[in-house]
């Protein structure tokens, strides 16, 4: 399986780079901060980098698609970020990461959230505990199938990591790509600062095999 994972990084002065140099800086920072969470199965390829100022670097060669973008919607969502005005790109990249996270919630808990912005964050906090209770309620009533247990456990993981995000869905508790799809890898930053994407920061979208 492949998926597009989102990483929030602090690139400092390197965030002012462009094109391949910006991609290389982001990938290098990711390797330094996240490489030990990957295994031999986690083949990876950068897709996009969006700097805190809204500058963008397209990592995929022209005409090539990320292995995880198997639907027209996947391609369309990425194209919308690329074509957007610079001032809108970071927020669109955050919304894209939320969309990826919500797909996991829908798959494992049947939670379908269509609202946008702050409203859908509130929906995650309201509906996910309810779905967790339903899942473990099934187990308590005797449904101990591997599928039921796996979905119940994944919901707990997803909610735990989402809850550790200062800027949802980017969790500040870091684990491997099998657990969560968006991580905040910025270091030496307090909770208030972490709620904002500053000019020296960037979001790296990475295609990772799991």
Image (cartoon, rainbow, N blue to C red):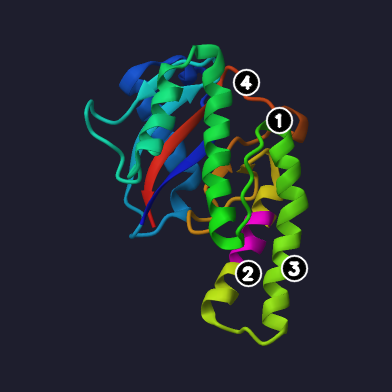
**Whole-percent x, y for residue 149 in the image:** 59, 76
Q: Residue at x 62, y 69 (%)?
A: 153
Apparent side of residue 27 relative to residue 156 in the rendered image (left or right): left
Q: CA distance from mark 4 to mark 3?
A: 38 Å
N-term mark: 2 or 4: 2
The residue indicated by pointer 4 is 198
The number of numbered badges drawn on the structure is 4
Q: Nearer the viewer, mark 2 or mark 1?
A: 2
Q: Is residue 143 above or below residue 53?
A: below
Q: In terms of secondary structure, where does tag 1 sit?
A: loop
Residue 152, numbered label? 2
The residue indicated by pointer 3 is 133
Magenta segment includes 153 = yes
Labels 4 and 3 touching (C-beta < 8 A): no
Q: Nearer the viewer, mark 3 or mark 1?
A: 3
Q: CA distance from mark 3 to mark 2?
A: 9 Å
N-term mark: 4 or 3: 3
**Whole-percent x, y for residue 75 in the image:** 36, 34
Q: CA distance from mark 2 to mark 4?
A: 36 Å
Q: Is residue 183 above or below residue 57?
A: below
- Based on the displayed image, in which of its 4 quarters is residue 185 positioned? top right
Instruction: Please report the bounds of the magenta region as a residue range.
Output: 152-159
Q: Residue at x 44, y 49 (%)?
A: 35
The residue indicated by pointer 1 is 195
Query: From this viewpoint, is residue 93 visible?
Result: yes
N-term mark: 3 or 1: 3
């Amino acid at each position: 399986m492949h998926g597009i994972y989102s990483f929030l990084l602090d690139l400092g002065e390197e965030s002012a780079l462009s094109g391949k140099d910006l991609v290389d800086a982001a990938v290098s920072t990711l390797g330094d901060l996240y490489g030990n969470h990957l295994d031999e199965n986690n083949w990876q390829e950068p897709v996009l980098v969006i700097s805190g100022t809204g500058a963008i670097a397209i990592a995929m060669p022209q005409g090539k698609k990320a292995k995880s973008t198997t639907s027209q919607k996947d391609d369309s969502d990425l194209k919308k970020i690329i074509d957007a005005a610079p001032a809108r790109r970071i927020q669109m990249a955050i919304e894209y990461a939320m969309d990826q996270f919500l797909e996991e919630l829908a798959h494992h808990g049947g939670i379908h959230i269509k609202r946008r912005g702050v409203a859908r964050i509130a929906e995650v906090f309201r509906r996910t505990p309810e779905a967790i209770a339903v899942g473990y309620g099934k187990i308590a009533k005797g449904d101990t199938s591997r599928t039921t247990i796996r979905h119940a456990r994944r919901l707990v993981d997803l909610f735990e990591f989402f809850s550790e995000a200062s800027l949802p869905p980017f969790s500040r508790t870091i684990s491997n790509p099998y657990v969560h799809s968006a991580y905040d890898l910025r270091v030496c930053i307090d909770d208030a600062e972490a709620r904002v994407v500053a000019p020296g920061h960037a979001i790296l979208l990475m295609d990772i095999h799991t």
